[in-house]
Every structure is written in C-alpha cells, then in structure tokens.
Amino acid sequence: MSFELFVSPKIKGLSGLWGLLGIEERALKCLNEKASEDSELIVVWDGASEEGWRRYVEGKRDGRRVRLFVGNFKGRERIVEIGNKSGWLEELVKEEEPPILCFLYDYCFLSNMYPCKVEIEGTVYPSVEHYYQASKCLYPMDAREIAQAKTPAMAKKLGSKLRKYDIKPGWWQYLKEEAMWKGLLAKFTQNKELKEKLLATGRRRIFDGNIQGEIYWGISLKSGYGLNKLGEMLEKVREELRQ
C-alpha cells in the first residue's frame, strides 16, 4: 500500500495535538486505516490555496485514485474528507479556476460572522449575522437585543432561541432570502476593503462548505449536497459590483 501525500502549506505547523504529532504522520495514520488500494494521491487541503486544488485536478485527469480532504479549525483541529456522492467535484474539475470551498484563511471575510459594520434602514449592525438574525424578529425589543449582541455568534444564538410566534410571518418562505441579500449588498458596498477582496476572487465559484450539515445556505463537505444559497448570492453581489 503506497501513498503520495500533499499537505497544504497553511495547514502545516498547527498548534495543539496535531501539531505535536506532526500533521503528515497523523493524516497518514488516519487514512491508512481506511484505504484499500495502492498508489493513492491524498490531498489535505485548506480549501483556499490553488496548489492543493491543482494537485487534486491533475490526479483526477490522470485517472488516479484521489481523495480530497479539507482542514477545519474552528476551535478544533480536524481534517474532513470531502464527500462526492452528488458528483459535484467532478463538475468543478472542469472549471478553469479553483473554487472557494469554504470560508477559511484568506476567504474568512465571506462569512456572515466576519465583523464589519453595516448600516441598514438607519440601524448600524456589527456584522451581517447581526442584521440577518435581527431581521427575523417580529418584535422590535427582540431585534434590538440581537443587534446589540457582543459577537456574531451570540447574535446567531439569540436568533435561534426565538419562538415561532416571535418570528415574522413569511420569514421561512421568502423573507429570509430578502434579508440575506440586503445584508450582503450593504456589507460589500459600504466596506471598500471587502468589496475589493470580493472582486479579487475573479469568477471563481464560491461555496459555503461546512461540516455542520447546513445545506440550505451552504453545502455539506461530508456529502457534497446542498443548495449553497449563500455562495450563489455572493457571486451575484460580485457581478453587481462589477457593473
């Protein structure tokens, strides 16, 4: 059983347990337990760098067995195998530019959790997440509490605790997409630096890849399934900014 392992430079040198064990050794140990074929190319990728994607694409075009993994470091160091049950990776290989598969490193600014002030209808919110969660509130008191939350994560938590009769009628049917679009447009038109970063992504496909199972706004990296509404909206905002 033989492997050719590529680990993204940004993943190397992690702190904590995986850093102590050595990322290459740890990755190979995990993968050796699952692999059953020889000469396998394993790409452990950060989801952002072009080099990792190039290795994956070249391996696929050469007809080799290739397994693609992505790093995820939200308080926990882990490597997740990207699922391909829907065949979406085969479609992406045809793209000229590597896709953005998750909001890590240089692309963390794409996340709604990214701290940036947005002013909408006279109210200033610390992030798009603050605005989105406050927008679902039927009562102004709840909306103010969420808008003043200390962090985007706290705003999301408060929004998730709202009872169904505290949420605006029609929120789940159509209002949530209207709110998301308005928040994203404000974010990238009111913050020049973020606007330039989004435009710098060129025409790369954008996916909100996650391991939490969010398949409406994003796409599950474990299965490859998801509507990826957030990624699509970001691409549309990018197109509007070009005009």
Image (tube, grey):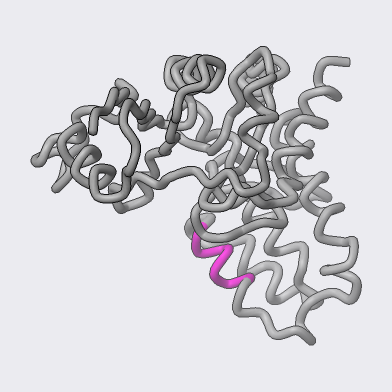
**Left or right: 3, with 208 as reference point:** left
Please tell me in which quadrant of the rendered image residue 136 appears: bottom right
Image quarter (top left, top right, bottom left or bottom right) of the N terminus: top left
Quarter of the figure with the C terminus: top right
Left or right position of 234 against 44 = right
* Along the viewing direction, whichever of 193 and 20 lies nearer the viewer: 20
Residues 207 and 54: in front is: 54
**Relative to 229, is 142 above or below?**
below
x and y percent of residue 238 in the render?
A: 77, 25
Q: Nearer the viewer, residue 135 or 50?
A: 50
Place of residue 168 in the rendered image (x, y in percent of width and height, measured from the top left):
84, 74
Q: Quadrant of residue 51?
A: top left
On the image, the x and y values in percent for residue 62 come to 51, 15
As displayed, is residue 137 above or below residue 21? below
Residue 88 or residue 11, whichever sits in front = 88
List the single residue furthest toward the left: 20
Does the magenta segment cover residue 158? yes
Residue 239 in view here = yes
Query: Would residue 126 be seen by someone viewing this image from the given angle?
Result: no
Whether residue 224 is situated above or below residue 185 in the rendered picture: below
Q: Which residues are magenta?
A: 153-159
User: At x 66% / y 40%, what residue is drawn?
Assistant: 87
Q: Position of residue 15 (x, y in %)?
A: 17, 39
Image side of residue 95 versus residue 213, left or right: right
**Number of dots carrying numbers:** 0
Residue at the spot 58% in from the left edge and 72% down from the top edge: 158
Residue at 71%, 76% in the rendered image: 141
Q: Is residue 127 above or below residue 151?
A: above
Residue at (69, 51) in percent of width and height: 226
